[in-house]
């Protein structure tokens, strides 16, 4: 019994220590402000591998989720004779929730795991250590551009996701199911607020971008430098990042749209 | 060479992001870039504005001719004041135009329906629409019905 | 902590690296116990010992990537454990290190790998960087491979490219971590020769960490044998090879049994096989 309590305690301390380590890591990575001449090209390359390479999966899933939302929404709304509210329903769902959340989950799976594996492999092959020996801070050179790239790419991807989602819903709702196009858009425009809905969605995805990238990059940096360690770190990235996104989503929603 | 491809792709990515946010702004949230001088403003006082919201449609004969721009309480008369921006192209509304707060479908969006009157003078910027009809509030109707006054009191 | 007065030529003169009474613990386990090692300037010094005795750790301590629990590590007069981050990075620009796996940056071609330290630490114009990079690659025989990606190189070539990177800034100290491990005899021979040649031609100080006795002994000027966290023997290659000390002898001559037992500590054979009872 005592043993178990002791084990629990040491586990707790370990978790706390990891949290502290990741916090200090974040601080150092951000504090190492990018030098534009050196880090500009690095940042571009990272935006490419983090953002551009995630674009296809975001586009495809955005279109499909928009179409599914339109189908489901249409079935329910026709029962109350208010299928012209379809645009409103789809747009609000996408902008407030699905856009930021699904994008963040996909991002964690696609870009987050890749970041972890890449950095973990760099550590395992002593690239980080050799960079340090050359006299370059890997936090500045490797971590910082990746972090900023994630910070920028996730909101951008979320916005793209919502936009193509709306287009997908338009295709299904208006073109296929025959909802009136004019009322589809005007209903949407009446109910969607730029500040309340679009901007809050962007803020959400900014927060998700920070958290997901932080987790991914830290897991890579903190990995045990063996092949097993890297595979474990990659799994942890996806699991932790997904849980963090869903949990934070609840808190943010409560703050933004709830009575808090 | 490879750097060039990467930079092109990132540029395209940023452009797509920009297009998407502009699409969300203009098309989805209806954020208008029109300058305000294309509309004129009239207002009406309502006993009860129901669930009317800012940016709701103002229609005449089912055609959208403007938007609700502001809603606030008149602190002397205790009535709701609704300001509407009417498109300049519809400049010949008579001064006795009537405004009603209507509902699209049973549970749908609230909007304002205008009906043309008979006067020869037209509404101009800053005019008041005197002839207003409040929103139908379901609870009031039900309450009246329960008290049994629906048929006797209301015309 | 105030940094101590530093001179590039310490009074004792000829040692580039001086490790004095240094203790380093990993958790509760001591990796080094009061170790004292001197690395003379301009020579090839080898640190030898069985696997798992923390030879790589020693290089990391010298490079300042790890901090000792006690003791002093002076590199060219700078007390490494006391240095701040910026100063440490400045001192490191005079060190080159060849990692066991080469540790080339996998996202850059060979040319950029070698150019990397130059771009970081100097403001040289592009054509001068080009000249230096090609010179260094020429020295390791890979000038023709400058456009290849690290993934396209064989293990031996990768190590040579990494060596070119390590000497790109003409460092005063080059550290080699297991340069012979996992190489075929031919590329091993190339690396052995290169270490000696570069040391003599460029006049830097070399530290070679290895457990390959013959290769190391053939190029080293001085050898330290490390085992169990202590220096168990030192001297010129001949002295160490012909040492009477049993532990040194066992390691240098590759004897299977000796002071370091062949058998992992276990109960006696009789007890295990005949006693029957599993506890």
Image (cartoon, coloured by chain):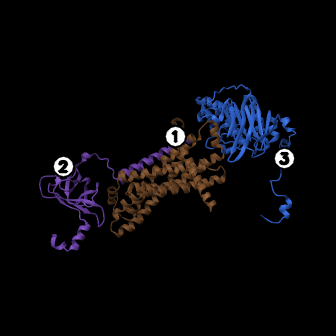
Residue C276 % position (x, y): 83, 66
Density class for disc 3 (Cα within 10 Å; few <14, some 14-19, many ≥20) is few
In this view, B150 is above or below B2: below
Q: How many marks?
A: 3
Q: CA distance from mark 3 to mark 2?
A: 104 Å
Nearest to viewer (mark 3 / mark 2): 3
SS for dot 1: helix
Q: Is residue A60 visible?
A: no
- Give the chain ID for the purple colour: B
Nearest to viewer (mark 2 / mark 1): 1
* Residue identified by numbered label 1: A31
SS for dot 2: loop
Q: Which mark is residue C259?
A: 3
Drawn side of residue C111 relative to residue A258, left or right? right
Q: Is C59 in front, or is A15?
A: A15
Q: CA distance from mark 3 to mark 1?
A: 52 Å
- Give the chain ID for the blue colour: C
Location of the N terminus of chain B by quadrant is: top right
In this view, B101 is above or below A134: below
Nearest to viewer (mark 3 / mark 1): 3
Chain A, hue in figure: brown
* Residue identified by numbered label 2: B126
Which chain letter goes with mark 3?
Answer: C
Which chain letter goes with mark 1?
Answer: A
Residue B75 % position (x, y): 20, 53
Q: Is residue C251 visible?
A: yes
Which chain letter goes with mark 2?
Answer: B
Residue C188 % position (x, y): 77, 41
Q: CA distance from mark 2 to mark 1?
A: 55 Å
**Rendering quarter of residue C138:** top right
Residue C150 % position (x, y): 66, 43
In this view, C39 is above or below B30: above
């Amino acid at each position: 019994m005592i043993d178990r309590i002791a084990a629990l305690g040491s586990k707790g301390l370990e978790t706390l220590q990891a949290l502290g380590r990741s916090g200090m890591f974040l601080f150092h990575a951000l504090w190492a402000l990018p030098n534009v001449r050196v880090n500009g090209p690095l940042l571009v390359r990272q935006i490419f591998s983090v953002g551009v390479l995630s674009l296809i999966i975001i586009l495809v899933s955005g279109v499909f989720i928009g179409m599914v939302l339109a189908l489901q929404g249409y079935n329910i709304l026709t029962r109350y004779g208010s299928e012209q509210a379809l645009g409103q329903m789809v747009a609000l769902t996408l902008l407030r929730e699905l856009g930021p959340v699904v994008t963040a989950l996909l991002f964690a799976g696609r870009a987050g795991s890749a970041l972890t594996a890449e950095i973990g492999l760099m550590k395992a092959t002593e690239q980080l250590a050799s960079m340090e020996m050359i006299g370059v801070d890997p936090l500045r050179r490797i971590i910082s551009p990746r972090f900023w790239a994630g910070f920028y790419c996730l909101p951008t991807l979320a916005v793209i996701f919502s936009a193509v989602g709306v287009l997908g819903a338009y295709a299904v709702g208006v073109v296929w199911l025959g909802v009136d196009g004019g009322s589809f858009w005007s209903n949407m425009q009446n109910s969607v607020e730029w500040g309340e809905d679009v901007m809050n969605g962007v803020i959400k995805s900014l927060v998700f971008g920070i958290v997901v990238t932080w987790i991914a990059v830290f897991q890579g940096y903190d990995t045990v430098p063996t092949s097993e360690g890297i595979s474990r770190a990659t799994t942890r990235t996806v699991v932790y990042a997904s849980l963090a996104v869903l949990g934070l989503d609840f808190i943010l929603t409560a703050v933004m749209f709830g009575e808090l | 060479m490879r750097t060039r491809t990467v930079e092109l792709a990132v540029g395209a990515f940023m452009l797509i992001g920009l297009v998407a946010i502009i699409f969300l702004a203009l098309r989805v949230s209806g954020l208008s870039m029109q300058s305000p001088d294309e509309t004129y403003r009239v207002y009406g006082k309502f006993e009860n504005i129901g669930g009317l919201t800012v940016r709701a449609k103002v229609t005449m004969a089912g055609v959208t001719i403007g938007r609700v721009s502001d809603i606030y309480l008149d602190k002397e008369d205790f009535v709701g004041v609704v300001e509407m921006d009417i498109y300049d192209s519809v400049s010949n509304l008579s001064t006795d135009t009537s405004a009603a707060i209507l509902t699209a479908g049973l549970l749908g969006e609230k909007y304002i329906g205008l009906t043309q009157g008979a006067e020869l003078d037209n509404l101009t910027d800053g005019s008041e629409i005197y002839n207003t009809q409040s929103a139908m509030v379901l609870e009031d109707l039900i309450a009246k019905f329960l008290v049994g006054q629906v048929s006797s009191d209301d015309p | 902590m105030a940094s101590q007065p530093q001179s590039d030529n310490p009074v004792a003169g000829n040692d580039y690296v001086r490790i004095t009474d240094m203790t380093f613990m990993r958790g509760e386990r001591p990796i080094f116990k009061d170790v004292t090692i001197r690395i003379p300037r301009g020579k090839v010094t080898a640190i030898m010992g069985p696997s798992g005795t923390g030879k790589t750790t020693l290089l990391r301590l010298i490079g300042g990537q790890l901090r000792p629990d006690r003791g002093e590590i002076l590199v060219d007069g700078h007390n490494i454990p006391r240095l701040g981050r910026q100063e440490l990075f400045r001192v490191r620009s005079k060190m080159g290190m060849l990692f066991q796996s080469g540790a080339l940056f996998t996202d850059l071609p060979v040319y950029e790998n070698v150019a990397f330290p130059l771009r970081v630490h100097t403001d040289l114009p592009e054509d001068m960087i080009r000249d230096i990079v090609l010179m260094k690659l020429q020295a390791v025989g890979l000038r023709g491979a400058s456009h290849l990606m690290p993934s396209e190189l064989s293990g031996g070539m990768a190590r040579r490219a990494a060596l070119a990177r390590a000497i790109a800034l003409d460092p005063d100290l080059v550290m080699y971590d297991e340069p012979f491990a996992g190489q075929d005899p031919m590329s091993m021979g190339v690396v052995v020769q290169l270490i000696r040649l570069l040391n003599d031609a460029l006049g830097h100080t070399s530290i070679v960490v290895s457990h390959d006795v013959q290769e190391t002994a053939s190029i080293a000027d001085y050898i330290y044998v490390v085992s169990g966290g202590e220096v168990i023997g030192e001297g010129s290659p001949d002295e160490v090879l012909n040492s009477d000390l049993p532990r040194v002898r066992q390691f240098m001559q590759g004897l299977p049994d000796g002071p370091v037992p062949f058998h992992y500590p276990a109960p006696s054979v009789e007890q295990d096989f005949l006693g029957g009872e599993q506890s």
